[in-house]
């Protein structure tokens, strides 16, 4: 990761490590630490405006969104920072103010177990079993029927393999969801 005159440039070739990090960022980094080194960030009022700006984005953009638990007894905010045209997004929360999710997309060159964004989803079957998560519409990976925590794969189809057998990996997501126990 390097810092040019105005913005922090992530390492787009860094290895992807489940429950740890990607692009030179580590899960658990505090928001204020990130903000002190990121440099110039263009903030948007909502997700629609932020996403509309992506094709022309040459640096970091950000937006916040309000969230509630299922019982509407707890409210918090996610702060999402997106690099360039969604090559990388970082998600912090206002519960513990830490980075809890890193998503890498098209243009990211780092790999997980020799698998990268743009590969056919079935390449993962050389190493793992696949489990489609209907709720998040992501694929989880398993080894010996045990889910590998902290990594998931989003494809171009958002459907189970039985309905769409040919799928391309569009995003690899590294996460630590432990903080969510604080909102239940």
Image (spheres, rainbow, N blue to C red):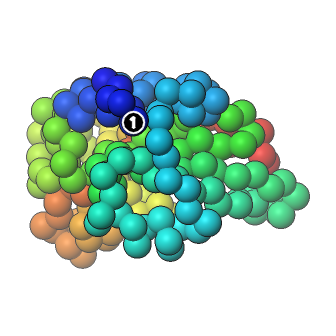
Q: Which residue is mark 1?
A: 7
Left or right for 106, reference 136: left
Left or right for 5, reference 90: left
Task: From the top left corner, tell me how far across and down residue 164 is, in percent.
Answer: 20, 73
State which quadrant residue 94 falls in. top right
Q: Nearer the viewer, residue 94 or 137?
A: 94
Q: Nearer the viewer, residue 53 or 160?
A: 53
Residue at point 40%, 72% (across, down): 52
Residue at point 49%, 46% (across, down): 41
Please state, as top left, top right, bottom left or bottom right, where the N terminus lies in the image.
top left
Mark 1 residue crowding within 10 angstroms, few (<14) / some (14–19) / many (20+): some
Left or right for 156, reference 34: left
**Tag 1, which secondary structure?**
loop
State which quadrant residue 20 falls in. top left
View extreme (right): residue? 73
State which quadrant residue 100 falls in. top right
- Position of residue 27 relative to residue 155, above or below, is above
Q: How many marks?
A: 1
The answer to whether residue 134 is seen in the rendering is no
Task: From the top left corner, tell me how far across and down residue 33 is, in percent.
Answer: 58, 25
- Position of residue 1 relative to residue 174, above or below, is above
Q: Nearer the viewer, residue 162 or 86?
A: 86
Residue at point 47%, 65% (across, down): 50
Residue at point 43%, 58% (across, down): 133
- Position of residue 166 relative to residue 22, above or below, is below
The answer to whether residue 25 is seen in the rendering is yes
């Amino acid at each position: 990761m390097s810092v040019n005159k105005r913005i922090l440039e992530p390492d787009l070739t860094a290895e992807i490590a489940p429950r740890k990090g990607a692009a030179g960022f580590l899960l658990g980094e505090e928001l204020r630490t990130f903000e002190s080194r990121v440099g110039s960030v263009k903030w948007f009022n909502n997700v629609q405006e932020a996403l509309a700006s992506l094709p022309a984005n040459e640096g970091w953009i950000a937006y916040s969104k309000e969230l509630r638990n299922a019982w509407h007894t707890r409210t918090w905010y996610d702060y999402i920072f997106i690099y360039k045209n969604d090559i990388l997004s970082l998600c912090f929360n206002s519960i513990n103010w830490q980075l809890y999710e890193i998503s890498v997309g098209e243009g990211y060159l780092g790999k997980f177990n020799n698998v990268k964004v743009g590969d056919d989803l079935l390449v993962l079957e050389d190493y793992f079993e696949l489990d489609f998560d209907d709720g998040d519409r992501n694929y989880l990976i398993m080894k010996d029927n045990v889910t590998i925590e902290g990594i998931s794969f989003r494809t171009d189809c958002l459907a189970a393999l039985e309905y769409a057998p040919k799928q391309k990996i569009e995003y690899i997501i590294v996460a630590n969801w432990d903080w969510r126990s604080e909102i239940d």
